[in-house]
Amino acid sequence: MNEEVTFILDAAKESMDAAIAHLEKEFVKIRAGKASPAMLSNVKVDYYGSQTPLSQVANINTPDARTISVQPWEKSMLQEIEKAIMNANLGFNPMNNGDLIIINVPPLTEERRIQLTKQAKAEAEDAKVGVRSARQDANKEIRDLDISEDLEKNSTADVQELTDNYISKIDSFLGAKEAEIMKV
């Protein structure tokens, strides 16, 4: 196979891998009933005038499946952290006991589970769009090369096969996430 075609296929594979990695990162943020420190990954705290990720100013633990505890490294940060969690609009009601912040994660209602499933489907669709975009770019680059018609056909078939593999990976990730969300 032509070296340029191999390079294009590798670049497409890299883009598709990035789409899958992004999808996995987004799926971690979608909660599925169990408490997880990742639920607070987007919370930013006003730490001496700069917006700092919560994980950089406090310890975040899950003592059990329904509780998240946040223990700041500086007690003076308790109010700021509590305010940041409220402002993050995650649907949590943090309780401050003077030493740490305790968040009780409520069980998901059926309606909320359906919303989260829709959110997961939307994230999966975004990943598929990323994969298809990588396919489109690769096919365009292959067409722009000065190669034989047969090699061009074979190369675009390889790109399509790669795309199909990644789309099926995304579908399997989505199926697993939906099952996790809908499990009571």
Image (tube, rainbow, N blue to C red):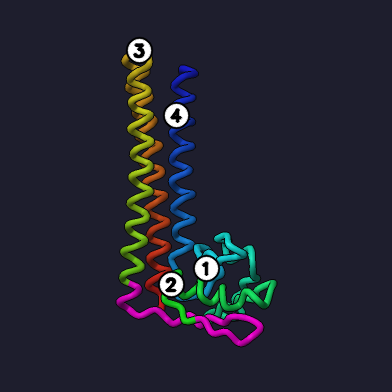
* Image-quadrant location for residue 108: bottom left
Residue on which the image places disc 4: 9
Which badge, 1 or 4, is on the more N-terminal residue? 4
Local SS, label 2: loop
Residue 23 lies, with reference to residue 180, above or below; the image says: above
The label on residue 148 is 3
Which badge, 1 or 3, is on the more N-terminal residue? 1
Residue 135 lies, with reference to residue 95, above or below; the image says: above
Residue 142 lies in the magenta stretch: no
Seen at 42% across and 63% down, the residue is 177
The label on residue 172 is none
| Stretch in magenta | 94-113
Residue on which the image places disc 1: 40
Local SS, label 1: helix
Q: Amino acid at mark 1?
A: Leu
Instruction: From the viewer's side, name the closer residue of 152 and 88.
Output: 88
